[in-house]
Amino acid sequence: MVHANEDVHARLATQALRRSLSEPERALAEAMETIFASGEHDFAVVARLLNDRQVARPSGQAGAWSVDVIESELASINHSLDEAYAAAPAIASYR
């Protein structure tokens, strides 16, 4: 038996992502996940590894990765995702 709430629950699983990640955003996310999975959590080392892997900045800006650049890029991505979330229609409540 299919419950009416199942559709709502499926949509709730992705409610925070109201736009797809761009290819550069996805590449950064995958690189950072791989780095973190290796046990590295020092952002200075993460920046060096992003440089070593030649991961492009999602903003399109040129230059080396640093802790400040990681912070700025992630803040920009989060802001963009927040804007997409705010602009999208709300998930209808279920009854």
Image (cartoon, rainbow, N blue to C red):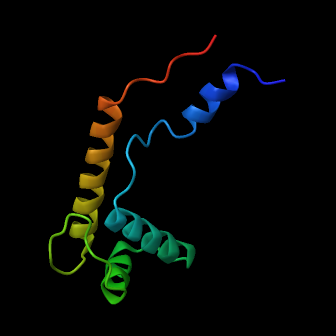
Q: Residue at horizontal 15%, vertical 70%?
A: 61
Q: Residue at horizontal 64%, vertical 10%?
A: 95
How far across and down, in percent of the image, does residue 55 sit? Answer: 32, 79
The vertical placement of 6 against 73, above or below, is: above
The residue positioned farthest toward the bottom in the image shown: 52
Residue 51, quarter of picture: bottom left
How far across and down, in percent of the image, does residue 45 sit? Answer: 37, 81
How far across and down, in percent of the image, does residue 9 sit? Answer: 63, 30
Quarter of the figure with the N terminus: top right
Q: 24 left or right of 3? A: left
Residue 26, quarter of picture: bottom left
Q: Residue at horizontal 38%, vertical 55%?
A: 21
The vertical placement of 31 against 79, above or below, is: below
Residue 82, quarter of picture: top left
* Number of marks in the rendered image: 0
The residue positioned farthest toward the front in the image shown: 1
How far across and down, in percent of the image, does residue 60 sit? Answer: 18, 68
The vertical placement of 76 against 95, above or below, is: below
Q: Residue at horizontal 34%, vertical 59%?
A: 22
Q: 91 left or right of 57? A: right
The residue positioned farthest toward the left in the image shown: 62
The residue positioned farthest toward the top in the image shown: 95
